[in-house]
Amino acid sequence: MRDTSHIVPADRRLPTGEFTVMIAMLFATIAFSIDAMLPALPEIAAELTPDAVNHAQLILTAFVLGMGAGTAVAGPISDATGRKPAIIGGFTLYIAGAVMAHYAPTIELLLAARVIQGLGAAGPRIVGLALVRDLYEGREMARVTSFAMTIFMIVPAVAPSIGAVIIGLAGWRAVFLAFVVFGLIASLWLGLRQPETLLPPRRRPLSGRNILSAAREVLSDRDVRLYTVVMTLGFGQMFALLSTAQQLFDVTYGQGADFPKWFALMAAIAASASLLNAKLVMRVGMRRLATDAYLWQALSSAVVLALVLGGIGTGWPGFAVFFLWGSSVFFMAGLTFGNLNALALQKMGHIAGMAASVISAISTILAVLIAGPVGQAFDGTPVPVILGVVLCSALAWMLMRRTMPH
């Protein structure tokens, strides 16, 4: 008989609709913290790093790097103290980093503040996933996560517009005050409404021995290792596109003034993927959906790369191809990330916090090593980022074929 002792009783669950929206807000901490900054990059470059404008992209990768490092400790802390204290503590650090960034006088201090902000953001993102795993498992978990991701995708759609409005009214530094407000609202919602899902008998003392034991258990599983590498490739190509998106829309295609609108449309298209996944996953299965999505992305990106290299140009035909391709990259994320997380945590319910931390820390930090060089290789064309997606998606597809069916 399957062991379900680790599943939290239903009486500690919020109504599904409220829980899904709340989890979406926790997940959206990352998207809002990245996408709301996109319209600010030209002004940050002009003010703080005018001689090397590509360095403004590091505002995004510094946050991701901090988030990756934070995931290594957020899960173990939540396994020891409970989910709610770890999430609220993460938001406290996130807010402190946002305040520091608001007052940072140099690019170096701004990057340091963004790393701190990313460290804090790891709490709601990673422990939020463990919280879902406390209450759900398997395809049901993937379904709930997919619905949360559908709501979550509204944030990338509106974040650049919110950032642009704030910048227009009060300058780019005021965007960080919006992060403070976001963190306070999310913390209060969780603190007042969600019962603790990790009760004291199931907590694991925070010790080096327990952390190493749990990490060893996670990394000793062949499929978990493969899913972690696949997530690394998926995050890497997505972060690479995000870090170059503003420059591509502005410098390459002359759409800088309308960038928030185009990005919103791109995110809206991508949001339908999570909704589609929520409907298909119970029938088709997580592994098959993710495998097919990476194959489709690799092939379609290869076609787009050939068109760009063949001279499709930077006018409206070229922009239309790029826009549809960029939307497909985010669409693919909706068909993969929720499924991959559920697959990786399938056998790790008893150490969900630690497992989520190990998997996310490895995949996020290594993704920066992919996204950083691709972003810095920006040469006025979409070739570097498209090539990066071709390679990452093809390798992800090959690795998914080596995993065991669930």
Image (cartoon, rainbow, N blue to C red):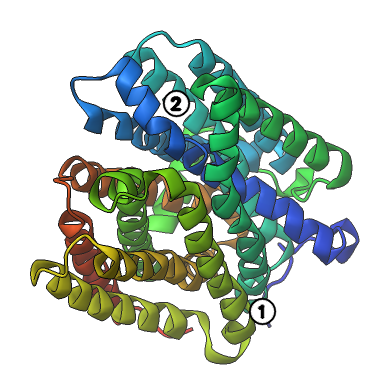
The reply, left or right, for residue 351 in relation to residue 63 is right
Whole-number angstrom distance, CA of label 1 to CA of label 2: 44 Å
Q: Looking at the picture, which amino acid does disc 1 mark?
A: Arg
* Left or right: where 181 falls relative to 280: right
Q: Identify the residue at horizontal 19%, vertical 75% (top origin).
A: 302
Can you tell which quarter of the image residue 388 is in? bottom left
Please say if 295 is above or below 318: below
Q: Please state the horizontal and vertical placement of residue 179, each as a whole percent of the image.
A: 61, 30
The residue under the point 23% across, 44% down is 375
Residue 63: x %, y % from top left? 42, 33
x 20%, y 48%: residue? 374
Left or right of residue 375: residue 198: right
Q: Residue furthest right?
A: 11
Tell me the element at label 1. Answer: loop
Disc assigned to residue 2: 1
Residue flagged by tag 2: what amino acid is it?
Arg
Q: Quadrant of residue 134?
A: bottom right
Label at residue 114: 2
**Which numbered disc, 1 or 2, marks the residue that appears first in the sequence?**
1
Q: Which of labels 1 and 2 is toward the front?
A: 2
Q: Quadrant of the N terminus?
A: bottom right
| Coordinates of residue 160 in the picture (x, y in percent) | 52, 43
Residue 56, position in %: x, y? 31, 29
Residue beneath the point at 32% across and 53% down? 241
- With respect to residue 348, does 143 lie above or below? below
